[in-house]
Amino acid sequence: MTTIAKKTKTVSQTKSADTKKNRTNGTGGKKKETIIVTAPATPVQPVSQIVKRGDIDFSPLQYRKYYSEKALLEFAEDLKQHGILHALTVRQTIEGRYELVAGERRLRGAEIAGLEDIPVVVRELTDIEVREIQLSENMHRENPHPMNEAQQIGEMQLAYKSVDEVAGRLGKSKQFVYSRIKLLSLIEPLREMFIADAIRLQEALEIAVLSDESQQQFYNQNCQEWREDADFELSDLKWTLNRYKANLKNAPFNTEDETLLPNMGACTNCPFNSASLSELFPDLAKAATCDNKQCYQNKCGAHQKRLIVQAFESDPQALIFDFQPTEDVTAILETIPAALELPQFFRHQVHTYTIPQEPIPDYFRQWNEPQNNLADEDNFDDDEYGDEEFEDGDEQTNEPSVTSEVREPVFDEEAYQEALEEYRLKKDDFDNQLANGNMQRGVYFSRNGITIIFFMENTADSFKNIEPSREAVTAKAVKEAEKQGNITVALYDGEIERLRTREKRAKEIDSEKFQLDLHKLYIDFNKEESNAIPTDADQAAAKLIIFNSLGWSGQRDFAGALGITHLTHTEEYRTALYEALQNLSDTDYRYLIRIALGRTNDVKHPNTADAYFLLKVSEEAGVNVAALKKTYAEKTAIRESKMETKIFEVERKKEILTKKDEVLI
């Protein structure tokens, strides 16, 4: 057993209270001062003693948690040859046991080397003193690992709080302190890689900016085999890390919105926003990259849900998709009861329409051509000044002196009124088609976002009376041709056709608006019960409702039986149908009712009003309902007889079983 005795050296120095001053004689030379400082003698270190390694416990206050496995193995080999040269510092906890204060690396190396006798110095220390000793030891360690520096700075932050204070005490820059603090964001598996030098400092810093979730994904997908791979190396790290980040400049949501995800706040001051890491990564300050992709995706989902909810405030009538809806979109729609009842279309199944835009007056201001003060530009002779001599300093120019007038815009009132009339026509057309249901409002899920669009399903009758015909000739084209002197007869013919087409469509729109207004007057009028005076037209309308229930083929057959051969949707057809229904005979009326009743779906289902009415009409019309009832009554009687027989047999078996149970009891 060897006791390690540390030699102590007493330094004895004296301080002279007097200052020797050497002056030069009258030369104004510099003063010289000699200061001799006497320091107190260094206190003698306590003598070490030997304790068993198993009696020493690691300190729970030690913040340094990471050691290079390779370095420890090399250190253990050195300990086998030379032993522990410097005693460990410990404090006694309970009788016979000690808590390690300083020297954890030596103790771990001794464990690997198999050394059982450990030289220690036992001191009485408080927890605060233990922390100070550990901090001091690590601060003065030669070439400490950046991860251990990070832990050290983390401990110092608890005591000194601000980065400026920590940087001042360490004598380091603020950027150095920030970089080490950032290393504390590394998850455990990546810290182990860093300590083992499997990743470099710059790589560790770039990974540390990611959220814990993203770091774990990065580790799982790129680093799990690092222990087994002796040549492990991260290649194209920046490109790989971009998969776990998001560009906030392209975010679909407002990055300043604090209410989107209240628990996360706005992106502007988020620690995962690279723009907030200017002290650590100055080159990324303008990038605005989100390093917490899970949060980014959550915000995208919350923004999408907000858009969908807002879209349903406009009472849409359909959902339209550019693509098969994603699981996220489907999940959001399932939370909105109204969405589940709406029809769904893909974009190619509908034709969309844009709201007509009112013409802007400024677009109809034209500029006059500039005028100059030359009386006759054609008579200007370039050679008139060709031989003129110029004095030194004068500048010769081939340009004549021209004074241009101030150009002012001229408002084209005629063109503006023409455009305004076109707008009003299209706007009336748009509003009418929306009001009468030809055009519908839908929530459109495109690759660029969620918007409200106006559409019509693509069918054979989709585009009937929706858009004015596309005109090859426009009023502007005719006017420009007239101004330029190249007007043609064909252009005038096209203008005439355009005006006639526009007037025809205007009449159609007036008719549609008239019908909408009439419908409103009709509804308001009939809200008063006193206005419900029966008329012949009411009887015709009642027959029309029954007629409409027949469906297209039934209407065609019944109208044909009444002698109506006109095409539908013509004035002749409407007039003929009204007169035929108004003058319908009682026999034809009853026939119409019975056909309509037989075509309703609910007459086939028992316990419905339609089924009961079918029964009563059939009985009074002479249908042999009694024979049908008798058939089903006989069928029921036979079935009930069989049932009674089976029940009797089951009851008998049950009685026998009950008696057996009573005997056993």
Image (tube, helix red, strand yellow):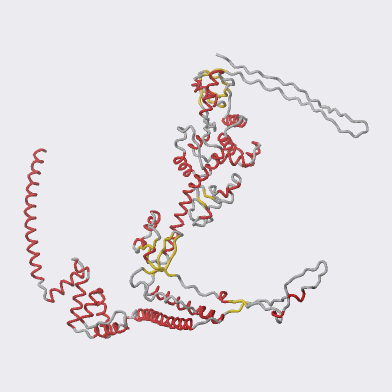
User: Does 15 appear above or below 598?
Assistant: above
Give the percent coordinates (x, y) of residue 371: 67, 78
Picture mark count: 0
Q: Give how far across and how far down residue 627 sits, in percent.
A: 8, 69
Residue 350 quadrant: bottom left
Kindly indicate the quadrant of the structure image that contains residue 377. bottom right
Q: In this view, does 501 lie above or below 336?
A: below
With 528 as the anchor, is 221 left or right in this view?
right
Left or right: residue 193 compared with residue 4 = left
- Specify the quadrant that holds the C terminus: top left
Q: Is residue 284 left or right of residue 591?
A: right
In front: 257, or 101? 257
288 vs 467: above or below = above
- Can you give x and y, in whole percent of width and height, for residue 73 in the image? 51, 25
- Which image quarter: residue 519? bottom left
Is 537 situated left or right of 444 in this image?
A: left
The N terminus, quarter of image: top right
Image: 92 above or below 398: above
* Residue found 25% across the figure and 73% down from its top: 551
Q: Which residue lies furthest to the top in this view?
A: 1
Q: Residue at x 77, y 73 (%)?
A: 386
